[in-house]
Image (cartoon, rainbow, N blue to C red):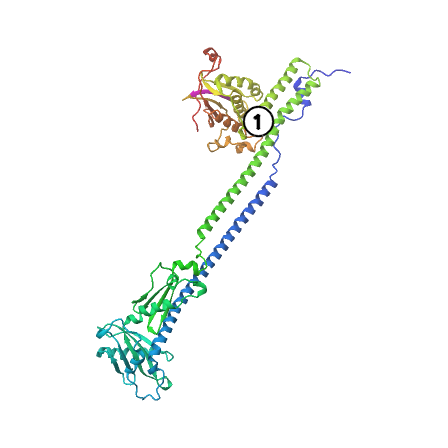
Amino acid sequence: MSEAPDEPLTAIVSAARPRTDFVMAPPPRPLGRPRSTAMVLAGLLVCTLVLATLLAYEAQLAARSHRATAERVLQDYAAVAAWELVAGVTDQMQAVVGGALAPVTRSRAASPYELLPSPSVLAASADSVFRCPVTGADAPRFYFRVDFRDESVATSGTTVSAAMRRWLVDSITAQVHTAYQPDWTYDVVIGGPTGERPLAFAYGVKYAEHSNALAAYGIATCVDVVGQDLFRHVLAHRALLPTSVRGDASNDSLVNISVRDRGGRLWFSSEPGQPSPYAADAPLKQVGPLSVHAVIRERAVELLALGSIPVSRVPWLVGLLVITAAMIAMTVMQLRREHQLARLRADFISSVSHELRTPLSQILLFAETLNLGRVRTDQERRTATGVIVQEGRRLMHLVENILHFSRAERQMTRLGPEPIDLSRAVATVIEDWLPLAGAADVRVETRFAVDVHALADRGALRQMVLNLLDNAVKYGPAGQTVVVGTSSSDGRARVWVDDQGAGIPTRERERVFESFYRLDQHANSAVAGSGIGLYVVRELARLHGGDAWAADAPGGGARIVIELPAAPLAPGFTDEHASVIAATNAVPAEPRA
């Protein structure tokens, strides 16, 4: 059996290993259920807003109905008070005036041509009725009879002028024919001829058969007698509102009464109080004629309306609806954010799994090759172990990145900053990373400034620089030159990494530092990435008291800058160490974009 010729290690590996050199696209995202759940929750929130709107509308309708009912009740109480005052005055006048005039007006005449008695007969029955407070010759007190058959006037008492006689005939005749009702027992007319003071004339009509008015008998007296005294007496002795409503409260405490004539002259007014919209009028036809105006006092509103009048709740309801809508909008935004976060986490898990699988596959492949003894020379063995070490370092870097991200999310990252030579520390990181650069066909150029010292944690600095280098390789073209540099100014030390890729759009330069965020052109491409590299860089930089940002590289592509607090000269660092560093064409970092 002949031996097969020796084959190089690369051929053996190519034949033995599975196809892991291509970039695997992440599996489809299971968005159906989360999106359905979010839609259901959003629908429920919208239904809640609609229900809250309907409830607010119903509450407003109920409050408005309650207010309308209470206002209507108060208007009715005002009308009751006005009519009760009219009834009280009518009853009082009926008892006083009607009784005084009854001897001459109660019985009907047997014939329209019957001889009428003299007005002096009223002195016996009406002498004490409506006496003026003024006595003597100035007291305007007399009795009269107006005969409608011949328009004659007969008087008894004080002297009456011709003008007054004429006015009596005209006014009493007009009132009887236009306003006086056959069932009335009295009427009061207030006035007088021009040039004379007005008087109050209380009269009654004597009828013949078939309600034919023969004559009017009456009393002339002071106006005040049927003004202040009459209404004050009625208010003091007659309840204007039902006892079940007013209780022990007086009329003056509940209702404000004012009485005016047709010309608007005020004849009587009770104790003034605060104005109220709940008022009513009632005509006092048999006195004046006058008009009674009753107003429910403000302090009586709660008592009569069984509670305060409900105020408009529209501003409150609109405010609550706006707050509810804002809370629902915030909830929907939060749901949307949670949905996006769940999707980003799913993408993160998928991407990390993919990134971890590639180095693990390489490690397993070359480990199996060594285990099966398929290497024939020391060079092949060194190549295999070199690949294992290289992929192990990449795997370690990925794991460290995830750990830093987890600690940053929980705010558990602890640093031990110390003064270090920044250029020297970055050069050490690059030296360890160069094998990965060679595998990716990337050249590295350094532009270190001399005497750049920073206060930094060595492990955190290593992680930040590795993340920037890893990003430069991922998002730059094959065969590119990655430039790494350091600089210092104004008490700050900076390290920056330039690639020759497509760069980062200005509007995206802040968002690339968010967790799980990737540019659109990369999120849907075959470029592997977890979206946490730059997030870890900025978090670690800020924990140092510095920052990180993105800018345009001078030669095109993207520049990521890490800024750290500057420190004094690192212990043990001399100019001899500085001469070892490859410092070519030192270029300061770009200013913050």
- Is residue 77 visible from the viewing direction of this image? yes
Residue 520's x, y, as percent? 53, 34
Q: Which secondary structure lies at badge 1? A: helix
- In this picture, which residue range is highlighted in magenta? 482-488
- 344 or 565: nearer the viewer: 565
- Which residue matches tag 1? 403
Residue 231's x, y, as percent? 34, 68
Asked whether, in this view, residue 417 is left or right of residue 164, the answer is right
Q: Total of numbered circles in the picture?
A: 1
Magenta highlight on residue 168 = no
Identify which residue is drawn at 59% across, 25% down: 399
Residue reaching furthest to the right: 1
The quadrant in which residue 265 appears is bottom left
Q: Main secondary structure of the magenta part?
A: strand
The quadrant in which residue 466 appears is top right
- 272 or 491: nearer the viewer: 272
